[in-house]
Image: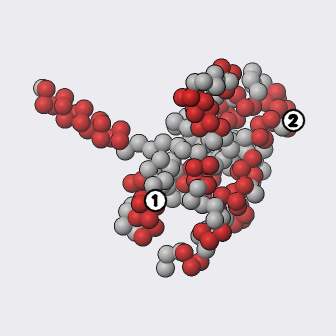
């Protein structure tokens, strides 16, 4: 019985080690800013995704929340927030109270937690590409890029129409239609041709 429980605990520990954490878009910026590599971060900044959280404070969003008889503002409503942040309900952005957002400046851990949460606002890289905690290491990025490591083993996901349809669907009160080819072309941020795998 003890051996069996030990094996279960070891297996659970191994599975836990395979979890990936959301690190936030500004951490992605470190490797995805230079023009030589495609300036993906700069391209993202020019999209609506980079301003998705701010949309929750607009008059239109507030009106929709009132029409839907929400008891909180859009930035506090899970049904609104889920498509305007990174990793909501999956270890990413959380709806938290004022005490969280205004920590004692001497409490370094709390200040760091606020910084992380701020970095998870908006529709950042990890919404489409998966949590970046394991991918962010240069050795891993190089391994994935060269084909010696599997991207999925390090938390990266394959972007497809299904990825976009998690939010761009008729559950959204502002949804009209969604053309994957057209919309993905508008937010394209590939590596330069000379960097792409042949």
Q: Residues within 10 Å of mark 1 (few under 14, many from 20)?
A: few
What is the secondary structure assignment of the residue under circle 2? helix
Can residue 88 be seen from the camera position used here? no
Q: Is residue 181 left or right of residue 146?
A: right
**As drawn, which residue projects farthest toward the front?**
106
- Which residue is located at x 63 percent, y 42 percent? 119
What is the secondary structure assignment of the residue under circle 1? helix
- Which residue is located at x 62 percent, y 71 percent? 36
74 vs 131, nearest the viewer:
131
Circle 1 residue: 138
Circle 2 residue: 59
Q: Position of residue 122 (x, y in %)?
A: 68, 44
Q: Is residue 115 left or right of residue 131?
A: right
44 vs 102, nearest the viewer:
102
Q: Residues within 10 Å of mark 2 (few under 14, many from 20)?
A: few
Q: Position of residue 140 (x, y in %)?
A: 42, 59
- Which of pointers 2 and 1 indicates the residue nearer the eye? 1
Q: Quadrant of the N terminus?
A: top left
- Which residue is located at x 63 percent, y 22 percent? 104
73 vs 113, nearest the viewer:
113
Mark 1 or mark 2, which is nearer the start of the sequence?
2
Can residue 149 be seen from the camera position used here? yes
Tag 2 near tag 1, CB within 8 Å: no
Q: Is residue 50 left or right of residue 28?
A: right
- Which residue is located at x 67 percent, y 36 percent? 81
Q: Position of residue 173 (x, y in %)?
A: 76, 40
On residue 110, which mark appears?
none
Q: CA distance from mark 2 to mark 1?
A: 43 Å
């Amino acid at each position: 019985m003890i051996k069996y429980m030990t094996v279960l605990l070891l297996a659970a520990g191994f599975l836990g080690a395979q979890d990936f954490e959301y690190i936030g878009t500004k951490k992605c910026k470190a490797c995805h800013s230079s023009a030589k590599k495609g300036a993906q971060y700069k391209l993202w900044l020019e999209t609506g995704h980079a301003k998705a959280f701010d949309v929750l404070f607009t008059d239109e969003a507030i009106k929709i929340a009132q029409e839907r008889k929400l008891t909180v503002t859009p930035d506090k409503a899970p049904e609104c927030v889920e498509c305007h942040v990174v990793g909501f309900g999956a270890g990413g952005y959380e709806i938290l109270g004022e005490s969280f957002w205004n920590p004692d400046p001497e409490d370094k851990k709390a200040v760091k937690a606020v910084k992380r949460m701020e970095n998870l606002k908006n529709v950042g890289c990890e919404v489409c590409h998966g949590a970046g905690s394991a991918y962010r290491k240069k050795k891993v990025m190089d391994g994935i890029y060269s084909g010696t490591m599997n991207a999925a083993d390090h938390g990266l996901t394959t972007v497809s129409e299904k990825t976009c349809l998690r939010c761009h669907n008729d559950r959204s009160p502002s949804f009209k239609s969604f053309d994957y080819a057209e919309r993905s072309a508008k937010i394209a941020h590939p590596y330069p041709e000379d960097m792409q795998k042949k």
